[in-house]
Image: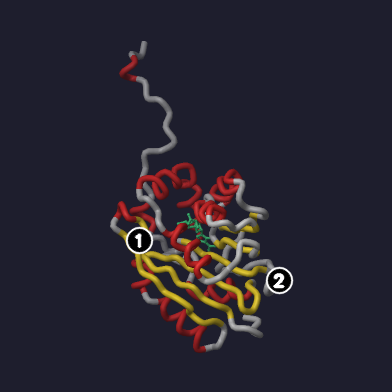
Amino acid sequence: MATVHDVRLPTVSDERFLPTSYGLEETAQTLAHYEAWAATYDVEIGEENRYAQPGRCTHALVASGVGPDARILDVGCGSGLSGVALARGGYASIDGCDLSPAMLALAVGTGVYGTLFEADLNEGLDLADDAYDAATAVGVFSFGHIRAGAIREVLRVVRPGGTVVVGLNDHFWDEGSMPAEFEAVEADGIAAVMSREHGAHLPTAGIEGWVITLRKADGIDA
Ligand SMILES: C[S@@+](CC[C@H](N)C(=O)[O-])C[C@H]1O[C@@H](n2cnc3c(N)ncnc32)[C@H](O)[C@@H]1O
């Protein structure tokens, strides 16, 4: 008969997923990563690593003058940490989309989203032009995640004069495709970078990152 010392109580998982997050290359690999991580994502990222970007991105949205009634799409909403921060910032009309059904299931549980739907941003969004007043993309432009060029798709679904806030880590910023794409959309007259702020991303892990605020040009259907 097993003694108490032989018994292992079931645990969700002791695995930590952050260390392998920056080594992802393909969408299928990224999907599998988040399907496996979903159950412990909020604890590892939100609690253990004191994830700062949701709060910073919400602050940037408020500071850019986006009002509480704005219709917001939270791109790559994940388990909903970014949407919960938006709701705490006073926003009431938040939709979300994500690649991972397991992450979306957790987002449903936050109660802060209106519509939630699956989408691969690298393939595009099944949404009309100009559908939202603003969009956020918090921690989703990264290795094997959403590619830099998809910022144009995010801008397409935001109305002319609307706002897009992107929060990303230093590792992906330093890879170079995002700063190059921000310059390119400015050069193409699609949007202007209104602010860029460097600061905390995952403080416990010592990782910092950028918050970039874009304003879509008036009269532009990106
Ligand atoms: C680090 S999590 C960030 C989630 C949430 N925004 C937050 O701040 O906690 C990255 C999210 O991006 C999603 N993602 C990765 N690649 C994607 C893609 N191509 N299209 C849509 N979502 C994607 C993942 O499923 C995951 O939920």
Q: Nearer the viewer, residue 116 or 114?
A: 114
What residue is shown with label 2?
Answer: 128
Q: Residue at x 35, y 65 (%)?
A: 199
Q: Residue at x 62, y 80 (%)?
A: 222
- Within 10 angstroms of label 1, few (less than 14), some, or many (20 or more) residues? many
Task: Estimate the x, y position of residue 79 in percent, counting from the top left.
Answer: 52, 50
Residue that extends furthest to the top in the rendered view of this protein: 1
Task: Estimate the x, y position of residue 99 in percent, counting from the top left.
Answer: 56, 57
The amino acid pointed to by label 1 is Ala
16 left or right of 136? left
Residue 153, above or below 12:
below
Which of the two discs, 2 and 1, labels the residue nearer the N terminus? 2
- Within 10 angstroms of label 2, few (less than 14), some, or many (20 or more) residues? few
SS category of the residue bearing label 1 = strand
Q: Residue at x 60, y 66 (%)?
A: 67
Q: Which mark is residue 167?
A: none
Residue that extends furthest to the left in the rendered view of this protein: 206
57 left or right of 75? left
Quote the CA–CA distance across marks 2 and 1.
Answer: 34 Å
Task: Estimate the x, y position of residue 39 in percent, counting from the top left.
Answer: 48, 42
Residue 64 visible? The answer is yes
Exactly how many numbered labels are in the figure? 2
Give the quarter of the image for residue 13: top left
51 left or right of 91? left
The amino acid pointed to by label 2 is Ala
Q: Residue at x 65, y 58 (%)?
A: 93
CB of residue at label 1: within 8 Å of ligand 1?
no
Q: Nearer the viewer, residue 65 or 20?
A: 65
